[in-house]
Amino acid sequence: MQRYTISDALVLRRAPLPSGDVVVTLLSEHGKWRAVARKGRLPGGNLARLSLFHDVTVQAYRRREDDLAVLTQVRLNGALPGLTRPESYPYAHLVAELADALSVDVHVGERLLAVVSSGLRGIGQHPDPEAVALAYAWYLVTLAGLAPLVHGANPPRCDRCGAPATVLAAASGALRCIEHGDGPRDAFLGEDGAQALAMALAGPLRTSVAQPPSERGRAWRALHAYLREHVGEVRALQGLTQASP
Amino acid sequence: MRYPAPLLALIRSLSRLPGIGPKSAQRLAFHLFNQPSDDVLALARALEEVTTGLARCPRCAHVMAADQAACDVCQDPTRDASVVCVVEQPADVLAIERSGEYAGLYHVLHGALSPMHGVGPEQLTIAALLERLEGVREVVLATATTVEGEATALFLAQRLQERGLEVTRIAYGLPVGGDLEYADEVTLGRAMLHRRPL
């Protein structure tokens, strides 16, 4: 077994420990993995480059019996300073946390790293980071094979009766009319919102970023309800659903 | 073989501490078992006093003795009350005090914004900071230079500038004694961006 490995990776999560070590969750082309950077909290050392959302090349050492790889070298390839702005920071957390949650049980494949990197770049640079985050969140869900069912297009229709879809039936995982929804756990979107969601699920990312839903609050609540049913609690979404009207 | 119940309870409690895994917890538990009972009881008393003898300062949220009205820094009349330095943790106050270069007051946030860990503005002492700004001229943002610390500083800067306060950020740059060759691009880039005349 090869003990030393070198990988290009994105820092998805970072948990500093009182001992001065940092446990990081890294996303590389081969998937998601966790590692410890001994004394990674000390400024100045090469392990201190393991900041959240940074694109790094890491050398890791792992013995067969170890739970976590130990990082021995870190080289910074790129940082995204735009992500610390209050307008974009919560959305960057959402994309990173969602990518982390989606790659627990499902092998999302090599594209995940490219999609997450491009999503974070978009959130850092686009004038409407919220639209980018919504589009990428649904794209990641689709990439993981967990997208809700959409029946028909322009407008999407309820799969039970053929009426225009207005709610996201979170438990059933489908766009439906209000009559055939699941009940209290449904997320109301309206016809426009259902149309925007159908486009985010089927269309290219560029289009869904350019034509975001007009009712953002409904869109976030729908995403939150759906993820809670099919992925688990995504903490970064709590602030977004509370902040949206 | 099963551990006796008191030993098992001790191992479980110790392994919940950050940075201590089950093996270390077991080693510490056996170490404590072999110590004189006076030493172990003194440790137990010290642990108990963490909950009963310590509190947060009602002004700055720094740690203080529970029987104090305010922490030592807030009570010190020689400190410059027109400057407040905002830090993430109580340990940061001690680090800045060791530098001997700051004579203002502090405000401890008890964390940094991190939505993926469920830490938003409500989980920090930001509301208390915004309420104690009467007579304050300058707020120094001394959160960590991590992404989380930087985002927290930018969030606070927006809120504080709306109130017409002078907001400053601790300087970024190279560590003392460091060679340029070994500095990373971000640190070096910021050191160049925030250079100052000599």
Image (cartoon, rainbow, N blue to C red):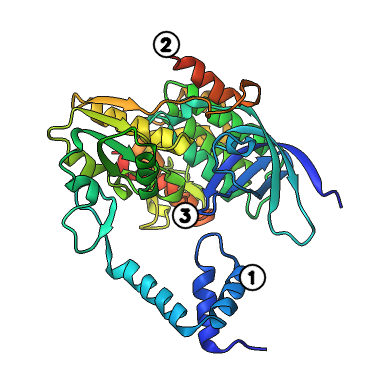
Nearest the eye: A83 or A147: A83
Nearest the eye: B68 or B78: B78
Dot 3: what SS?
loop
Marks 2/1: CA–CA distance: 54 Å
Chain-order first, disc 2 or disc 1: 1
Residue picked out by circle 2 = B198
- Using the image, name the chain to which the residue with label 2 belongs: B
- Using the image, name the chain to which the residue with label 3 belongs: A
User: How would you rate the neighbour count of disc 2 (Cα within 10 Å): few for under 14, some for 14-19, many for 20 or more?
Assistant: few
Residue visible at 53% across and 80% down? B35
**Eye-nearest disc, 1 or 3:** 1
- Using the image, name the chain to which the residue with label 1 belongs: B
Residue A188 in sight in this render: no
Dot 1: what SS?
helix
Can you give x and y, in whole percent of width and height, for residue B197 in the image? 41, 10
Residue picked out by circle 3 = A233
Can you give x and y, in whole percent of width and height, for residue B198 in the image? 42, 11
Residue visible at 62% across and 39% down? A47
Nearest the eye: A171 or B107: B107
**Eye-nearest disc, 3 or 2:** 2
User: How would you rate the neighbour count of disc 1 (Cα within 10 Å): few for under 14, some for 14-19, many for 20 or more?
Assistant: few
- View extreme (left): residue: B134
Marks 1/3: CA–CA distance: 31 Å
- View extreme (right): residue: A1
Q: Mark 3 and mark 1 in contact (Cβ < 8 Å)? A: no
Residue picked out by circle 1 = B23
Label 2 is placed on what type of residue?
Leu
Marks 3/2: CA–CA distance: 53 Å
Label 3 is placed on what type of residue?
Glu
Q: How many marks?
A: 3
Residue A178 in sight in this render: yes
Residue visible at 76% across and 62% down? A65
